[in-house]
Image: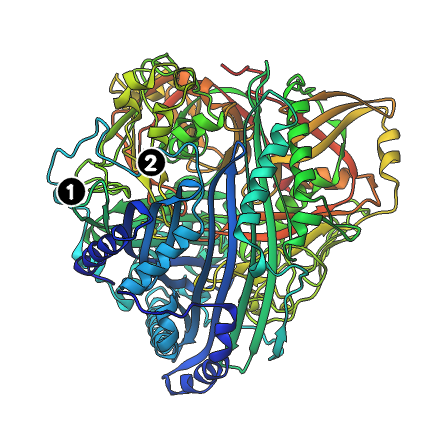
Amino acid sequence: MVSLTNLRRAVKNALAFTSSQPDVSEVEVFASAGRNLTVRLNYTSHIPSNGVEEPKSTEGYGLGIRATFNTTNGVKTGFGSEPADLSLNGVARALEKARAGAVTDPKFVSLPKLDSPQRPTRDTTSLANYDPALMKIGNQGLVKTGWSMMERGLEAFESSKDLLSLAGYPEKISELGLILGGDVVMLQDRMAIGSTHIPSIQTDQNTVVMSFATAMIETQSSKGSGWSVSSQLADFSGESAGEAARNAIASINGERIPTGEYNVILGPQAVTEILEWVLMPGLSMDMIFAGASPFIGKLGRMVASDNFNLYDNGSEPGMPSSKAITDEALPTGRTNLIQNGKLSGFLSDYYNYQRILNDPTGSEKLGADPRSVLESIAPRNGFRPNNGGGRNFAGIPRPVPTNLIIEGNRANNQEELLQLVGNGVYIGRIWYTYPVNGTASGDFSGTIIGDSYLIKDGKFAAPLKPNTIRMNDNVLRLINNILGITSKHRATVRWSSDQVTWAPQIAVSGYGLEEISGYMENA
Amino acid sequence: MPTQFSRVTVESLDRFRANLQSLVAEKTKSLPSLRYCDLRIQVREQKSAVAENGSDKASSEDCTFDFGVRAIAGERSSASGYYGRVLGTTDLDQLEDVIWDSIKQAHNRARANARHKSRARNRFPILGGSLNSSGLAEVPVCQDTVHANYTSDPRQVPLSEISRMAADGCKSIQSQGNNIVYSAASASTFLLRELYLSSDGADIDQTFAQTEGFAITICSSEHGNFELYDFTGHQKGWEILTEGYDNGPIVLPNFMDFCEALGSDAIEVAAAPPLKPPDKEVTVVTDPHFNTLLVHEVVGHPSELDRALKYETGYAGRSWFLKNMQDNQLGKQIASPLVTAYSDPTIEGYGSFSYDHEGTPARRAYILRNGVLEEFLNNRQTAAIMGSEPNGSARSTEAQLVPLIRMTNTIFAPGNQDPQSIISEVEDGYFIAGHRTPSIAESRENFRITAVKVYEIKNGQLGRLYRDGGMTSDSRDYFMSIDAVGSDLRVNPIPNCGKGQPMQAKRMSNGGPTMRGTARLTGPGSLSGNQRI
């Protein structure tokens, strides 16, 4: 992969060249190199399979230029990028694309400046979200990560007394329909950036290894999950597949429940899914402008239980999604989104930060004078995410979460949540949970697909049969009906993203559950 | 100072086609234990623009260039390895070296994978038995060149015209009323050329034109902001947005009319009261736009054989059509005899092609014929496992990504009933028009899909309009309940079907005629009527 030194040099040279062009009034040069290494798993005991299905990778490098141009029709802004060429020829091509595509955007104020409350306060190289071993992993290492997951999963299946008991004989275990799927994803990322307003070239490099495994005993309709995330290869063991297999075995003999409103505990994966697909879109500044947020005009008001806190922190050392700087050369940091139930901020990039400051209806949109709440809207989240995670030189910045953290104020443990729920359901894993009536409404629907249990008299009673319950509820109602939040949370990953949510377990009252798919018992 | 430079165009591939074919078919013979290799390489020349609230937001004229390699190798056991990369102009002078190095990387991964597979078979004597050598079903080895079909060449459209189209689209939306609080529109047009070369000797060169428009609006009302968006587009040139298109099943208005209708619908629906759904099943008549998403989610996806064979257990989900090789729904009646659905890349649509990304010739695959499950959509590997004939459903969004099993143009076949009579026969029911957002159960055995509009039907006439409504049902129950299928087939573009890791958002077409069945309705808030806060 292209070295940081070469990326830094390319940005320096590009900045000098582009700044010297007579029609360029402001310019920002972003160069990156990234590689996504993914190993997909597919093991089935009852159908021929490959075990490790796809050891693969994609990679690219290049530079992207945002510039403002003085034209006879006024100031125009444009973006252009060029892959696989960091020379001045590549710079010239990218600049020409930016010039050709430049438009007059009435909302544009300037390229990013260090003029928000978020100031550089630390040595940004100390985040340590980089692992040389992960950056250098080769083909053998790539394939080995997948098979280490496969081996942990098969070990858990093959050593299970419960499965042996179900099958009767060891050689019959495979007839139970054992499935192990999922993947391990490793991201390698380097970037450099410099601009007219922040001319000192800044660099960053990040690595992350994420795994997600799903195991099933299909004849028993039981399913379990396991996952891991770290920036260090040494932290990866493949154990997430063993966890998934054990969880699948633990959920054999699942039961159905009838339609109704239930007290529930949402596990970390369920919390993450609802948070990221349903709640977070409304906490992004661009959605405020679109009128597609349920939080328009509510800054400073109570929007959730006073026990609910949600913040994004891209600068916390050791957290997997921490970055030294944003993809706009601005310092990362903590943005409080909901604090003690009160709406406290929005994720923003520089464009949207400037847009709200200069919007005559900004106070109406936020619910407060934007200039009096600069901390709440500071541009700490301008990133250019690649498909699957990482940084993409060919994209322009937009508000993107980093490490999302949910916390309660009352430090409950799981036993306390079970007591608070009394009789209800622990929902471990959900699926396809979308805002079904638009993001502004908060309405969502999804199904429960595994890792879930019935709760009776404050204790786990029996597994819930996967794929038998559809959830129908509203996220604003959910965050206002919180019974308790555990102090312990778990780093949880999301499909095709390097965003990490530190999710606790959350107990909620009156959650809408609908029994579905009765015909599948005999299908 | 920069020197004069060349640029990548779709024609750039002319220079390399023969040498790359030789590389894949001949030079790879020197690689130990290589059983199969294929290369996909593509160039896309694209122009696009975005506008917001009537003002320009961005525009771009660019080219993407990338490739992906698959190798199957191994001695005692075989396995796959892949490698993909983004390319640039500078790679033109060294392309064969870059690709040869990448073939070696994929081959190296495949061999390592095969060695681990052999070890796992030995280490897990009970469970390792199902770990098989990777194999591909036979397909004809084709050499062909397929040209794009367009009137107005995407490369010749001035970028300023594309910007103007997007901005004018916004203005068309806004012209519909003062309570439109937000509008955005985008327009794009591109020419895409793909080479497929294999160690078997396949040498396929396909070029596609594609033009797309997107519009979104948010409309305020006493019932809360209402959000509505939709896409238009076709595998044609820029004429799709300037003039529209009508071939019978595909009816695309020009982009201004498209945006105007979107704005008008949003205003009408936003003002309507939220639906309070009855707590029992009702008669539902669904229009072709709603059935576009229904057939996509509940017929197309569960017919993908990678899901059915559990490859997607951790992500896109399985399929209720197949528990295992012995216990499945093939040949069984799972829908009303009135229901036929097929996937056909040989008809016009967003999912049209002559060969898929494994070089398999395109053909129609009947998923449901007269309500009986007949065929899964497959790729060469899953076809080999099932012992079935490949039907050409393996596709990726970019050459650097691994092809997945995908719908093509997947539709409910039309019946012969007048759509108006399907409504007029209903004494008491609901008309569900236009799709919004789906939420589908893991094996596609149950669905909830929200609609743009829900009308009461009373005594055969459309009555009151409601917003925030939709319908939900167990899939088999709904399909068995269908008692009328209209003659009014419409085929619509679906530009953003997400699947895979990393996620690939694929274009395809879906559609259907007006249909009638029974289902439960859904409304706003929670199931039990807990209202929004």
Whether residue B169 sits left or right of residue A4 in the image: it is: right
Q: Please tell me which residue lies in front, B197 or B229.
A: B229
Which residue reaches farthest front?
Answer: A72
The answer to the question of whether label 2 and label 1 lie on touching residues, with beta carbons closer than 8 A, is no
Three-letter code for the amino acid on which mark 2 is drawn: Pro
For the C terminus of chain A, the quadrant is top right
> Which corner quadrant holds the N terminus of chain A?
bottom left
Q: Are marks 2 and 1 on the same chain?
A: yes
User: Numbered disc 1: what chain?
Assistant: A
SS under mark 1: helix
- The residue located at (70%, 19%) in the rendering is B278
Q: Position of residue B484 (x, y in %)?
A: 83, 39
Q: At 37% across and 63% down in the image, what residue appears?
A: A55
Q: Give the side of residue A215 with respect to residue B423, left or right.
A: left
Q: Residues within 10 Å of mark 1 (few under 14, many from 20)?
A: many
Q: Amino acid at mark 1?
A: Leu
Viewer-proximal residue among B143 and B235: B235
Disc 2 is placed on an element classified as: loop
- Is A442 positioned to the left or the right of B282 in the image? left
- Measured in 3D between alpha carbons, the distance from the residue under mark 2 to the one under mark 1, in whole angstroms, is 17 Å
Disc sitting over residue A401 in the figure:
2
User: Sequence order check: which comes first, mark 2 or mark 1?
Assistant: 1
The image quadrant that residue A198 belongs to is top left
Colouring of the image:
rainbow
Report whether residue A517 is seen.
no
Q: Is residue A7 above or below residue B287?
A: below
Disc sitting over residue A127 in the figure = 1
Q: Chain of mark 2?
A: A
Residue A226: x and y in percent read: 35, 44
B416 left or right of B378 in image: right
Q: Front-most of B273 and A454?
A: B273
Mark 2 is surrounded, within 10 Å at the Cα level, by few (under 14), some (14 to 19) or many (20 or more) other residues, namely: many
